[in-house]
Image (tube, coloured by chain):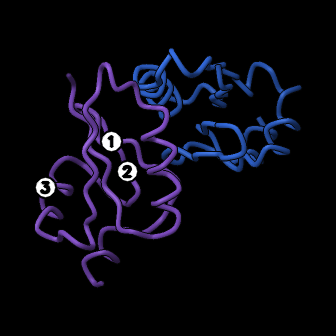
Chain colours: A purple, B blue
Amino acid sequence: MEKAVFYHAGCPVCVNAEQDILKIIDRSKYDPEVVHLGQDPTRIPEAEVVGVESVPALWLNQNVLHINFGASLTDVKNG
Amino acid sequence: MEKAVFYHAGCPVCVNAEQDILKIIDRSKYDPEVVHLGQDPTRIPEAEVVGVESVPALWLNQNVLHINFGASLTDVKNG
């Protein structure tokens, strides 16, 4: 199983994107984790390290797909 | 099978996103079509009607996921 992490911050754009991504992702190959950076800000540094610049974003082994444009990580940090 | 259409315009951002999307998408549920709007500009009006505002974008039955930000449809039209 490959890892996939969906980072979001609870915004409406994020929630819609989360539903779509979790619906299309092939569960036979991926084990998706959903991280709510608003509720779990301890994961923000990790998100920055892997290349997440805005949420919602989907991290797939090395690559980050930024989906729509919800909020920058700076906005998430500033609450 | 549900329909999924990935609209792009051949830019490097688009190509990377295409590879990722085609890799994660569950082929048991979706039959993805890839449309290169630069090579097939006759599909641009359709893309606009379904809500595509920039490429790369993934259209999934009613919803459009805009991925990263490659180019606006205006840029694609203006070649």
Q: Secondary structure at mark 3?
A: helix
- In whole angstroms, how far apart are the C-alphas of marks 3 and 2? 13 Å
The numbered mark 2 sits on a residue in which chain?
A: A
- In whole angstroms, how far apart are the C-alphas of marks 3 and 1? 13 Å
- On whether disc 2 and disc 1 are found on a single subunit, the reply is yes
Give above or below for B74 relative to A76: above
Position of the C terminus of chain A, as image quadrant, is bottom left
Position of the N terminus of chain A, as image quadrant, is top left
Which amino acid type is shown beneath numbered disc 1? Val
Give above or below for B27 relative to A62: above
| Residue that lies at the very extreme toward the bottom in this rendered image | A79
Locate residue B64 relative to residue B21 in the image: left or right.
right
Give above or below for B1 relative to A5: above
Disc number placed over residue B32 in the picture, else none: none
Which residue corresponds to the image point at 25% horizontal and 49% vertical from the top-left? A51
Which amino acid type is shown beneath numbered disc 2? Ala
Residue B44: image x %, image y %? 83, 34
Q: Residues within 10 Å of mark 1 (few under 14, many from 20)?
A: many
Disc number placed over residue A46 in the picture, else none: 3
Q: Residues within 10 Å of mark 3 (few under 14, many from 20)?
A: few
Q: Are marks 2 and 1 in contact (CB under 8 Å)?
A: yes
* Mark found first going from the N terminus, 3 or 2: 3
Locate residue B75 relative to residue B42 in the image: left or right.
left
The numbered mark 1 sits on a residue in which chain?
A: A
Residue identified by numbered label 2 = A57
Which residue corresponds to the image point at 22% horizontal and 25% vertical from the top-left? A2
Disc number placed over residue A64 in the picture, else none: 1
- In whole angstroms, how far apart are the C-alphas of marks 2 and 1? 7 Å
Residue A64 or residue A34, whichever sits in front: A34
Q: Quadrant of residue B79?
A: top right
